[in-house]
Image: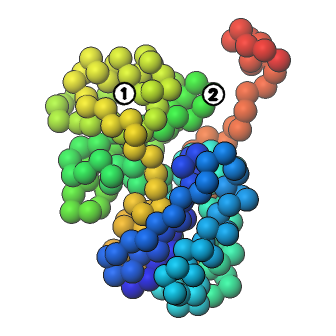
């Protein structure tokens, strides 16, 4: 099985090729936009593996939530490639891609949503799959409901971005895994069993998962919070 996976929901952009369980991954160069580097990186990855888009079984992409511009890059690239070769698309959320990397158990995936908010999702990870508990949400760090049972871990960059959230998590004994961000390798690993089950969507239906529709605060809002216009 050959699956191409793309992930650009954060500053850590990447693409990966899943071949029957073996994964080859390449990461976008730092300091340059994903829109500039992703497609050349895909060509490099496929060339190194000696395969073409035409022989892929499916294409997976990180659907979000995450940076609005980044989400459109992965979604647009995946959609264009899937249309060109008539392959199904597998959308995988950025939070479950993070949770998978945290390992089996109860995982709280937390991604900095900017604008003073956090993208959050609770997952039960087992046997290489992630099961969302409840819904993905976006809310201020002070309002994030925390698990009331032990054994949880929190992954993602939100605790580092919001000291209040980090203090709340540490006070409840939740272990922090701050270096985990969504990767194309994790997207591919989650997509593989779904492809095997015949899941996937038509390329025309692909869309980013924004969760929050608002891109930026207005001038009035920033001034009201003591910021600059």
The N terminus - image quarter: bottom left
Residue 81 position, x and y percent, is: 65, 78
- Mark 1: few/some/many CA within 10 Å (<14, 14-19, 20+): few
Q: What residue do we see at 48% from left, 62% from top?
A: 184
Q: Earlier in the sequence, mark 2 or mark 1?
A: 2
**Residue at the far front in the pictured view:** 48
**Residue at the far left in the pictured view:** 150
Q: What kind of element bears circle 1?
A: loop
Q: Is residue 52 left or right of residue 120?
A: right
Q: Taking 82 as reference, is 106 above or below it?
A: above
Q: What residue do we see at 57% from left, 81% from top?
A: 47
Q: Is residue 44 left or right of residue 158?
A: right
| CA–CA distance in space, label 2 to label 1 | 19 Å
Q: What residue do we see at 59% from left, 57% from top?
A: 28
Q: Which quarter of the picture shows residue 39? A: bottom right
Residue 203 position, x and y percent, is: 62, 76
Instruction: Check disc 1 and report the residue beneath it.
Output: 145
Instruction: Check disc 2 and report the residue beneath it.
Output: 115
Q: What residue do we see at 61% from left, 54% from top?
A: 29
Q: What kind of element bears circle 2?
A: loop
- Mark 2: few/some/many CA within 10 Å (<14, 14-19, 20+): few
Residues at circles 2 and 1 in contact by the CB criterion of under 8 Å: no
Numbered disc in front, either 2 or 1: 2
The residue lying toward the viewer, choosing from 15 and 79, is 15
Residue 16 position, x and y percent, is: 48, 68
The C terminus - image quarter: top right
User: Which of the numbered marks, if any, corresponds to residue 66?
Assistant: none
Q: Is residue 197 visible?
A: no
Residue 120 position, x and y percent, is: 44, 38
State how the image is colored.
rainbow
Q: Is residue 35 visible?
A: yes
């Amino acid at each position: 099985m050959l699956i191409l996976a793309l992930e650009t929901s954060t500053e850590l952009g990447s693409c990966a090729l899943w071949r029957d369980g073996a994964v080859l991954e390449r990461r976008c160069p730092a300091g340059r936009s994903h829109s500039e580097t992703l497609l050349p990186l895909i060509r490099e990855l496929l060339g190194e593996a000696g395969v073409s888009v035409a022989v892929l079984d499916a294409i997976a992409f990180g659907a979000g939530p995450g940076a609005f511009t980044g989400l459109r890059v992965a979604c647009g690239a995946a959609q264009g490639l899937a249309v060109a070769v008539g392959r199904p698309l597998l959308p995988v959320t950025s939070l479950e891609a993070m949770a998978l990397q945290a390992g089996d158990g109860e995982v709280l995936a937390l991604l900095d949503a900017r604008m003073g908010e956090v993208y959050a999702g609770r997952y039960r990870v087992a046997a290489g799959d992630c099961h969302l508990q409840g819904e993905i949400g976006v809310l201020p760090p002070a309002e994030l409901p925390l698990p009331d049972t032990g054994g949880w871990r929190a992954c993602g960059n939100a605790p580092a971005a919001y000291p209040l959230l980090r203090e709340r998590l540490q006070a409840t004994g939740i272990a922090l895994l701050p270096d985990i961000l969504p990767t194309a390798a994790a997207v591919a690993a989650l997509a593989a069993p779904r492809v095997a089950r015949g899941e996937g969507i038509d390329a025309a239906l692909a869309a980013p998962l924004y969760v929050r529709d608002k891109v930026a605060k207005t001038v009035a809002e920033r001034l009201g919070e003591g910021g600059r216009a």
